[in-house]
Image (tube, rainbow, N blue to C red):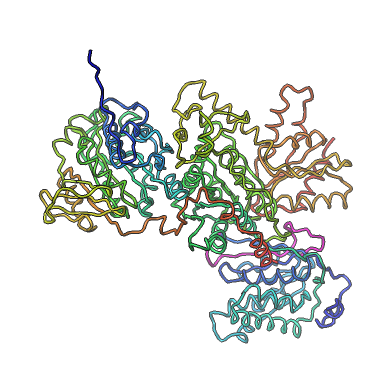
Amino acid sequence: MSTVVSPPPKENRIGLTLADYKGAASTLCSGCGHDAITSQLIKAFFELGVDPYRVAKLSGIGCSSKTPAYFLSKSHGFNAVHGRMPSVATGTVLANRTLLAVGVSGDGDTASIGAGQFVHLLRRNLPFVYVVENNGVYGLTKGQFSATADLGSKLKTGVVNDLPAIDLCIMGIELGATYVARSFAGDPKQLVPLLKGALAHQGTALIDVISPCVTFNNHDGSTKSYTWGKEHEELLHEVGFVPFFEEIQVDYDPGTTLDVELHDGSHVLLKKLHRDYNPTDRGQALSLLRESNEKHEFLTGLFYVDTKRPTFVDLLNVVDEPLATLPTERVRPARKVLDEIMQSLM
Amino acid sequence: MSTETMVRESGRAARPDVTVNDFSIQVATVNGSGSQSSNTVLMRSIFQMGVPVSGKNLFPSNIAGLPTWFTIRANKDGYIARKKEIDLLIAMNAETAREDVADLPPGGAVIYEDTLKLSELRPDLTYYPVPFVELAKQVTPETKLRKLLANMIYVGVAGELLSIDHDEIKKAIAKQFKSKAKAVALNQSAVDVGREYARTKLKAPLALKVERLNKTAGKILVDGNAAAAMGAMFAGVTVVTWYPITPSSSVCEQLIDFMKEYRIDPDSGKATFAIVQAEDELAALGMALGAGWAGARSMTSTSGPGISLMAEFAGLGYFAEVPAVIFDIQRVGPSTGLPTRTSQADILCAYYLSHGDTKHIVLLPATVSECFDLAIEAFDLAERFQTPVFVLSDLDLGMNVWMSDPFQYPEKPIDRGKVLTAEDLARTSKFERYRDVDGDGIPYRTLPGTRHPLASYFTRGSGHNERAMYSERPQDYKNLLDRLAKKHETARRHVPVPVVDDNPKAEVGLLAFGTTHWAILESRDQLKNEHGTETKYLRLKALPFTADVFSFIKGCKRVYVVEQNRDAQMAQLVRLEVLAAEEGASEVGQVQKIRSILHYTGLPIDARFITDQILAAEAGRI
């Protein structure tokens, strides 16, 4: 009789296994793009060896916003109200700047009801990873168009969208986000390094992930379906990621590969495919996206990165420790301060 | 300086019918003409003479050009509510001068710009024409400054006519312009020019006079919004989020000044706070709740329209049990309403803010020192009860300057409520975020970043069970709603109790809250001294009602709920909760005792209005 010994699960640099980064079982439709993104998030956190106790997960309302329950069960989560994740995230990060705040939102949550808060989050460059699971429709309310649906795309019912789409990446770059990327739920090879880069980045990292809705927007005539994505995705570059705790092993040709060093010493490596592209050039990023939209391309990659701009927390000159737990003597001025103010009012 | 000396020095004959230390001055100017400094100097100099004062700014929703009125009431007995009748008008606005004069009671007096030719309007007033424009030329060659300095000239004229001590005006100017020596000198010379003109040219005796008294020693003058800001700072607030709106902006603006002065870490030079001007009120409360969830003492301040926008997040805060403090400096609604006028009409809205079954803790300051104390209390209650707490001030309290005893340093330690740390969790085997462990309806919480496997939970505004898991089970939802109701009942025993004067000689009870208090104080004396009507008085400081409210109503034959709104909002709430308390009780009929006195013009309520209404109601009683 032989005993089958399964190998011990692989541990990351802080001794946790992939399972330690999982959450509750998903209640989304089988095959949902969002579940694929959840898996890539789990993978990115695990491989980076992020301490789950440091993470705060945030979301708004909608299918996408349910997903923070499906990863990192050891982290606190906050499923806020519709379109208001940015404000809740802002308060959370200001209260405790040592947290790694990660948010998942959808296209309705971000581009319609939440457009106001989204815009101002970008302006502030809050240290925050903002993942949009973008499927072009409202799923929970059964398939209405969202504001990211492409002009001319068709609902299952045959209704044609006659309004232009909001390009979240253009908004992100234009309004001040400092790490802006687009990816595809069906392309884990690209999504994982992009997510890792976002987690290592200091500032607002926006990743617009096209994530097919298998129930309401995966048919012919949709530009957010798996088939459309697989047939049309055009990679801007090949994305690689080397975390700060690893040496860059592979030799790369600086002529064809661009190395972006992030604050924590990690590197995003962008290998040139068809065109020369420098993601630190804001003007180039904007014209690339505009041109690509005119040609109805589905372009993915890291469009823009700025590692210099100060974050909102730095701008506010907040103390290094979490404000949330400062002791009384640091937050309640002494008796003589009140006496001094009272004197001035007499 | 003795009284006689001052009278003699003024060069006018004393009149037998002179009213001392009991009058109202109204200064009518144009918004944006810089009259605020001169009005403050005038008020402060009376205050420094030891005479109780109050100042009320009646201003338009406008940056410059529209009429504005500032009323100073001096009263030897310490009544500082609004008084309707004006005794001395300072008419600086050509546009309103005629109407302002027409509104004066017989025997009133008018200081006015000579060229306005007001003296032919009414024979029953005393007129003091002053060539302000000409006099300003003596003070400065700069035309731009003359307009501002004309205001300071009326301070000199009024000071002379009212016999205000020259040195007190000088002191008030020094305080107003602080260390700016040039401004002090210029303003002082404007006052001197006015004073000299009045002394030499205005011979008609004024029947009003300020005499030195000793009733303001050790007192402070401050606006309620500054007081609330100070309260927040001493409460240890760390995250402040706001969107500018009249009349609440000066809460956060003054808080920014205080925090920059007193809350910068001496070692690092960094701030022990974060203050954010949000994109709107939705975001302001969203940020405050995000911060409260992560463990910060957080607040926002707003007014009517902002409160409406915050309804969605207020419901989330209540249902997901997240602390935050919301200052509502009430103005006149609905909609944009009268943005620069006062009201107490957000009671029901704040108490029930949100869709679904929701009831909040609401604190009701009536005085500037309560703005300070209740601000501190609000943060403790928000964290103790893990819920948004509203502090309902109003424009009259928030933006006007009030006399007060100095504020008391908080002796009670900061209460952070039921927060479990990693060390606490190490001593237990179980943590369920929404379980009522102590039987008071208040669960325990952990903060994001707590390093313990039991710590994490998922906060949501959707249905959840005791373990914070998503749930649509009917019993889970009902249990949650019932526990939240229980928590509200616990709050009933912890919120500040009302101030009660249970006068045993009285059948009639008065019930009020907020700034209505000041008019009530005066009205009770009028009722007693002029009509022999004794009253009991209960002043609410919080919602939900404490048991004192029910026993007070039981002890009265009739209860007049006096408030500054149309729909008798507090009276309705009292009726509702008295009815609920009466359910199944043998004695019924408490509800029938409750009547309303309602004032809703946008102006602060005055004592005479209350007195007249009560007398009429009492007379009509069979």
| Residue positioned 82% across, 81% down in the render | B12
**Residue positioned 46% across, 36% down in the render:** B452
For the point 71% across and 28% down, which residue is it? B581
Of the pair B222 and B79, the residue shown nearer to us: B222
Name the residue nearer the viewer: B549 or B99. Answer: B549
Residue B462 in the image: state x and y as whole percent: 45, 31
Tell me residue B412's x, y (percent). Answer: 67, 48
Question: Position of B228 compared to A267: left or right?
Answer: right
By secondary structure, the bulk of the magenta-drawn segment is best described as loop
Work out whether A224 lies above or below B11. Answer: above
Left or right of residue B131: residue A321? left
Q: Please state the extent of the stretch shown in magenta in the rendering.
A: B61-85
User: Is residue A119 found left or right of A238 in the rendered image?
Assistant: right
Give coordinates of residue B274: x percent, y percent.
Answer: 48, 55
- Rendered image quadrant of residue B549: top right
Q: Is residue B362 visible?
A: yes
Q: Position of residue B131 (x, y in %)?
A: 66, 81
Magenta region includes residue B83? yes
